[in-house]
Amino acid sequence: MRVLDGLRVGLHIMFAFLLGFGVLRSLIDASLNPAVPLFSVLMAGLYMAGTVNERHRAKQGREIPAAAKYAWLAGIIVLWLLLLTHSQDFLWLEFPLVLLTLHIAALVPALITALGLWLVAAFVPLWLHPETWGVAAAVGPLIGTVFAVAIFFAYRALHAEVQHHRRVAQQLRATQEELAASEHQAGRLEERERLSREIHDTVAQGLSSIILLARAGKNSEEPGKQLDTIEEVAVENLAEARRFVRDLASPDVQASLPQALRATVNRMRARGEALGESTEFRLEFAGASEESTPGSALPGIPQPIAAAVLRCAQEGLSNVVKHAQAEMAVVTLGVFGDAVTIDVVDNGVGMSDAQLKSQQTGSFGLAGLRRRIEGVGGTMDIESHPGSGTALAARLPLTSEKEN
């Protein structure tokens, strides 16, 4: 747009220069004729009034009526003809007049008018001053007219290109805004789903355990053990709820994953005993984790991987307590060179294919656990048969692209 504005300003400067040049030459080459400065002032005033009015209306987004445009152009041309009859030094004003005509009128009438302007510029001097007229007096305005037409078409092509790029830029900005809004909405939904899984895996499971323990305590002659376990679960879930309010983060288990798993197994063992279950809970280690001492850190496990491992163990053991009626449940943590594995196996009542499919649908539970594991590049498999127990196995790569 700076280039287009520069061309328009250049046209105004050229018009003013050629008009002033004609006035100066007419005053030098001939005796003072009062009509020349009069017509020159009228022409300059009319030209300036038209350009200022056009600029003012353009800022307001209003169009000048076509009749007003043609009247203004006709007035400019008439004054030029009057000046040309008094002095042929105003001949070169024909060049900017051709540009004005092409800019204002429709293409075909503008080209016809431009041809008429050239005929006037070329042959009026022949009629008025035949003794000084030559072929160059006709060829010069012709070259100027052709050059003006070429400049006009180049200007129009450049203007069309600018408008095209402006529309493309507007579409690009609109697309970027839509994309930003979509990404923002996707981020909100992803965060909402993450928080839903966290609440389900912690607070909701704790409340479910409290309900089971409370029911067991009602039927017990000495509900002290159930009450102690209820208190422990309530304290634990209160801490989880406060953590959500504080920073909405996943549990920091990277440096103490074996210890966190031991605490989880111990809590499940206590809940099972409080509910009157005889399930034996065991924690085993394989790979690098087998060589770790109790409470020691396991280097090289990213925080999201460690959190997913802990949630997998919690979900698997929670299902054992709720549904399995198993004699034994074994949690096995394996840490190898490129992956971490977590297995939860029980010898309980198991599930049919229909029950297993039902457990893996929805937004939470096993379905939510699967999405959590897949979110860090891992895989999860579940095998279960009636009377043969259930095996939940997950593998989480330590070198996944997501973690890198």
Image (cartoon, rainbow, N blue to C red):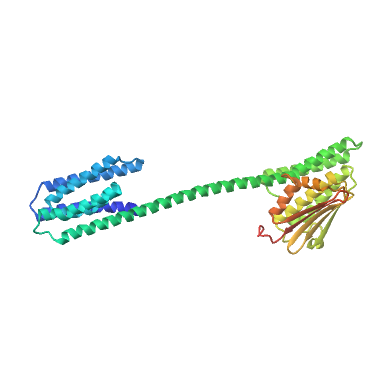
Q: Residue at x 68, y 45 (%)?
A: 195
Which corner quadrant holds the C terminus? Answer: bottom right
Question: Please, which residue is most extreme toward the top here?
Answer: 218
Q: Which of the two residues, 367 or 269, is positioned nearer the viewer here?
A: 367
Rendering coords of residue 380 (x, y %)? 75, 54
Q: Is residue 298 visible?
A: no
Q: Residue at x 12, y 50 (%)?
A: 86
Q: Residue at x 78, y 42 (%)?
A: 206
Q: Which of the two residues, 39 or 213, is positioned nearer the viewer here?
A: 39
Q: Residue at x 13, y 50 (%)?
A: 85
Q: Which of the two residues, 257 or 401, is positioned nearer the viewer here?
A: 401
Rendering coords of residue 355 (x, y %)? 81, 45
Rendering coords of residue 215 (x, y %)? 85, 36
Rendering coords of residue 134 (x, y %)? 13, 61
Q: Is residue 309 visible?
A: yes
- Locate residue 34 relative to residue 101 in the image: left or right: left
- Locate residue 131 relative to residue 14 in the image: left or right: left
